[in-house]
Amino acid sequence: MKLCATLLLGLCLAAGAARAGVFDDEEARKAIAALGVQVEANQKAAEQRLARIETLVQDRSIDLARQIDELKQELARMRGQLEVQTHQLETLDRRQKDLYVDLDARLRKLEASAQAQQKQAASAPDPVAEGKVYEAALNQFKLGNYQASVAAFQGFLATYPDSQQVSSAQYWIGNAYYALRDYKMAIAAQQKLLASWPDSAKAPDALLNIASSQAEMGETRTARETLQALLKKYPGTPAADQAKQRLAGKR
């Protein structure tokens, strides 16, 4: 715009001079030449300025692109860190949950074990009292109070089902029925002992008592079979020795 204004001013001056006749041709040529030089200088200055502006814009564009690229890289890096931290948090959360479940399971087991021990301790029989009940039932048998002995031993079994004396108590029940001449009940009681506690020390005596009951009932053949079973299953016991003697005496 400045260049155009300068050119217009020069043309106006030239036209005015021609109309007024102030300048002659030489002066006119000089003026035109000077005006040309001025126009050329102004044009060159304008071109230089435009070049500087273009360079500045280009430099700024390059710098802006570089900054944008750096920001993109930084954003990608931050996203990567965020993903890593998120994964770590999720892993930590899972580990904490697993740890909680494991601790809860262990606590439950410990609580159950403690409760079981408390119940066991609470229900554990008094060995002194247990012994007294057993002896009282056995004394009834020794006194000949067989029915009372049966009732006492049955009460003992109900009160102390885990006692080490349960098989013995069952044997004396069968023996008491034998003394009462109730041989069927005697056999049933001793068969219960053999079925529940076949390894009991009273098992050979139970078989011998069964054979005695069978003999009293007139079942001689069955009694002999029972004695033979006693010899085979419990050899070397006092009951087996008695079985041998009975078998020998009946031959």
Image (spheres, helix red, strand yellow):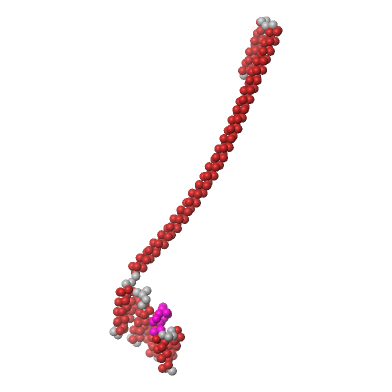
As drawn, is 149 to the left or to the right of 230?
A: left
- Taking the view exactly as shown, the residue that stands out farthest to the front is 236
Q: Residue 42's x, y, as percent?
A: 64, 18
As drawn, is 91 to the left or to the right of 171?
A: right
Q: Is residue 120 above or below residue 186?
A: above
Split into 4 quadrants, where in the image is the N terminus? top right
Asked if residue 204 lies in the magenta stretch, the reply is: yes
Count the numbered circles shown: 0
Q: For the point 67% across and 5% down, which residue is it?
A: 21
Q: Residue 51's x, y, as percent?
A: 63, 25
Q: For the point 60% across and 27% down, which residue is it?
A: 56
Q: Residue 135's x, y, as percent?
A: 31, 79
On the image, which quarter does residue 196 sit in? bottom left
Q: Is residue 56 above or below residue 83?
A: above
- Taking the view exactly as shown, the residue that stands out farthest to the top is 21
Q: Residue 140's x, y, as percent?
A: 29, 82
Q: Is residue 210 above or below residue 10?
A: below
Q: For the point 67% across and 13% down, which residue is it?
A: 34
Asked if residue 131 lies in the magenta stretch, the reply is: no
As drawn, is 246 to the left or to the right of 23?
A: left
On the image, which quarter does residue 139 sit in? bottom left
**Residue 103 visible, this orientation:** yes
Q: For the point 33% across and 72% down, which residue is it?
A: 125
Numbered range of the magenta stretch: 194-205
**Residue 220 visible, this orientation:** no
